[in-house]
Every structure is written in C-alpha cells, then in structure tokens.
Image (cartoon, rainbow, N blue to C red):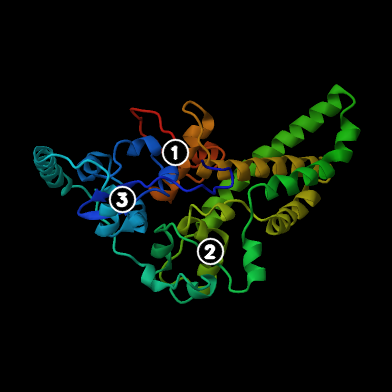
Amino acid sequence: MDTLNGTTEQRHKFTVKYRQEYYDLSNFMHKHPGGINTLKGLNQTDMTARFLKAPPHSDAAMYLMREYKISAQDYEGKKKTKERPSAAKLADNGIELLEQTKQSAEDSNNNQLDDSMEFLVDWSEAMLPQIGKITKHYDEWVHKPVDRPLRLFGPWYLEILTKTPWWIVPAFWIPSIIACGWQEFQENSHNMKGFTVLFSHILFGVLFWTLLEYSLHRWVFHVKLTSDSGPWLCTLHFMIHGLHHKVPFDPMRLVFPPLPGVILATVIYTPLYFILQNHHPRLILVGALVGYLGYDMIHYYLHYGSPSAGQHLYEMKRYHYQHHFAHQDLGYGISSPLWDIVFNTRIYLRKLKFQLKWA
C-alpha cells in the first residue's frame, strides 16, 4: 500500500513485453500519469499492439520507459506460472501488431525509445558538480526524466538539507503563519469592519501568491537555456528546479525546504512592507504564506495522491503530469490554471473514456 510520503511496501511483479524488449513496471504503476487502470490486463503479456493503439506518448515518457527494462531471462522467470497463449492467439496478435506498426510509422513518435543521454553523467557521484561539464547538452538532458536515486551534493551534511519530508512544511509554516498574523487578528476580529479587513487582505495575499507561483515557475524555474548557457546558470537551474524534472518521482524533493523558503519570503516581503506599510502588509504576507502552504501540499499530492474524478485536484494532477511529460513549456500553474489562462499558456486536456485511478 502506498503511504503519504511516497514509500511503498513490496509490490507484486508487473512485467510486460514491448517491441521485443521486456519491462518490469512494478514500481511505476502508481506513478503512471495515465493511472493504474490504464495498464489493466497487461501483466505478463506483449503490450505492443495495445500500446500502439493508445494516444502517442511523448518523447519524455518514452525516455522514462527505459528505466524499467529487464532481461528476457528475468521476464521469463517472472511469467513461468502464467499460462502461455495459444499459437492461434499469437498469430492474431502478430497480424494486429503488423497493421498497427505500419500505421504508427507515420506518427511523429508513437512510440520509439530515445537514445539515452545518461552517459553524460555519473549517477553514482554527486550530481551538482557535474552539471557545469554538460552545459552544451544540459537543457535536453534535464528534460528527459529518469526514475532513480539522485545525490545532489557530496558531503552528507549538505545533501541532507536538500531532502524534505512533506510533513516538515506544515509543521514549520503553520505556527509561523499564526505567529505572523496573531497580533493583526486580535486587533481586527472584534467587529465586522475589522473582520472585512482581515479577510480581504488575506484573500489578496493568496491571490498574490498564485501570481508569484506562476511567475517563478515560468520565468525563473523554466528560464530559457541554450547550449551556450554558462555553467553557473545551468547549475543554479538544476538546483532550484531542473532536478525535479529530471527525477520527478523523488518524494523527498517535492516540497520546498523551510530555510530557502524563509529567505525567499524575506526577500519578497521586505519591499512589500515599505510599499504597503499603511495597508496591513503583514496580513498580505499571511495570505501569501497560506497560498504557498497550499501550493506545496497540492504539489506533493499531485505526484503521490489519488484524487477522484470530478474533483479539482483530479484535473490538476492530469494537468501537472502533462507539464512534466508532454508540455514542459506550458501549464505553469500548480494549484490552479488561472494564470495559465490569463497568459495563454494553458494545457488543454483531452476527454477521457474512463476515469483514471492511481491507487
């Protein structure tokens, strides 16, 4: 069973065959953007024909697929208790596969595995010192996701600061938010006018955060990089956001560590205080921090939660996965697509024939 921090108990083996190669999807099923039920009935089968019928997978998705490749011996060992299909069924599958392959040859991708770029780095070593050596290929490499452990720094005392369990964020920020707004709350909660001041300023702060969330994600985290971008810029980009696109399933790097969060909040709040010092800037800060807290928890849930169809978070989970694996230059909103609509960077999700489930 999945736990909220993303760890899992031992899963039943789920192996498939695709284009004469073999894959163990046991640890990928609950992460699959299309949900667990998309893979229903594929265990220990040749999924090629069905895969080719599906909507084309993105280059990033196909690149990720190689992470789960296993040997033919492992595959046969895991399926030997499975009844083998009849010769007639194999023949029918072969004819269907041939027809689908001919049709898919006209598609842009569906569905060939990209050549690996992982030879550029040594995954057994700290990654951050290596980024400056691959700047020519960095932008392409960082947008090709993998599912493996990543060490950012060499020294353990630095590395541990880069990993944050999800519960650290509410444990730190909820008391901080209360302390920040307690005096204002006491002064303005005794009458309707004061309550209106509280509500309106906090609401403005939340709205301000949603714009800040979008702006940081689009123009800072996704700053345009080229083969000529310098080592410092590529290294900074990888540290603040690139690593999340490279290893999108790392549960310890899905929320923002409190220390850099405090620094960022201070940098943003200082000019805000001087500009709005007669307009309850602390209440606006409270609202912004509430918005940030909601954003970080939503972001974690979008990766490891299983929202039900019809809910806002169900659509946002699909939306965010599209950003990761298909449209990395669109869909910058995490908690809401509001500013994507305003700035014309919205991702339009296709209609589904069935409900997706991730647990």
Find residue 266 and report its horizontal and vertical position in percent. Answer: 75, 55
> For numbered disc 3, what is the local secondary structure?
helix
Residue shown at 41% from the left, 48% from the top: 28
Callout 1: helix, strand or loop?
helix
Sooner in the amino-acid sequence: mark 3 or mark 1: 3
Q: Judge whether 193 appears above or below 227 on screen.
A: above
49 over 256 or under it: above or below = above
- The disc at residue 224 is none
Whether residue 230 can be seen here: no
Whether residue 353 is situated above or below residue 65 in the rendered picture: above
Callout 1: few (<14), some (14-19), or many (20+) C-alpha neighbours within 10 Å?
some
**Residue type pointed to by label 2:** His
Label 3 vs label 1, nearer the camera: 3
Which residue corresponds to the image point at 52% horizontal and 47% vertical from the top-left? 8
Q: Are marks 2 and 3 in contact (CB under 8 Å)?
A: no
The circle on residue 78 is 3
Q: Amino acid at mark 1?
A: Arg
User: Which residue has dot 2 on it?
Assistant: 237
Q: Residue 92 vs residue 150: left or right?
A: left
Q: In x, y percent, where is residue 231? A: 50, 74
Task: Give how far apart the Cα atoms at labels 1 and 2 are.
Answer: 25 Å
Looking at the image, is mark 1 or mark 2 earlier in the sequence? 2
What residue does disc 1 label? 318
Amino acid on which disc 3 is placed: Lys
Residue 252 quadrant: bottom right
